[in-house]
Image: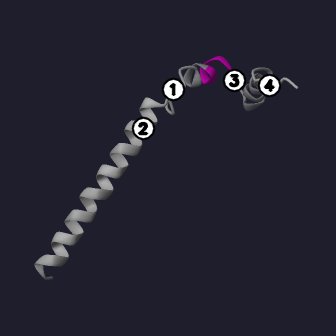
Amino acid sequence: MSSWVIALMLGMSIFMGLMGLIAFLWGLKNGQFDDKDKMMQGVLFDSTDDLNKLAETTKPRNKQ
């Protein structure tokens, strides 16, 4: 492989890594990963039916 191909591959991998890091930090800043109650809901309710009932009762209601 010639050196320009290696340099191009290295440059593109660094660029793609930086874009992934920027996207991850943007998600953290905007609260994309904030779900404090997710693990607790699994502990409190035994079956998927119980979780579905909870999801139905806690849905935000649209005011029209």
Q: Pointer 1 and pointer 4: residues touching (CB < 8 Å)? A: no
Q: Residue furthest left?
A: 3
Q: Is residue 25 above or below residue 20?
A: above
Q: Pointer 3 and pointer 1: residues touching (CB < 8 Å)? A: no
The residue sitting at 28% across, 57% down in the picture is: 15
**On the image, numbered disc 4 is attached to which residue?**
53
Q: Nearer the viewer, mark 1 or mark 4?
A: 1
**On the image, numbered disc 2 is attached to which residue?**
26
The amino acid pointed to by label 1 is Asp
Label annotation for residue 46 = 3
Tell me the distance, in whole angstroms, between the alpha carbons under discs 3 and 1. 23 Å
Tell me the distance, in whole angstroms, between the alpha carbons under discs 2 and 1. 13 Å
The amino acid pointed to by label 4 is Lys
Where disc 3 sits, the SS reads: loop
Residue situated in front as seen by the camera: 58 or 32 = 32
The amino acid pointed to by label 2 is Trp
Question: What secondary structure predominates along the stretch shown in magenta?
Answer: helix
Q: Is residue 59 left or right of residue 14?
A: right
Magenta-colored span: 41-45
Q: Estimate how packed mark 2 is, as few (under 14), some (14 to 19) or many (20 or more) residues with alpha carbons within 10 Å.
A: few
Q: Earlier in the sequence, mark 3 or mark 1?
A: 1
Q: Estimate how packed mark 1 is, as few (under 14), some (14 to 19) or many (20 or more) residues with alpha carbons within 10 Å.
A: few
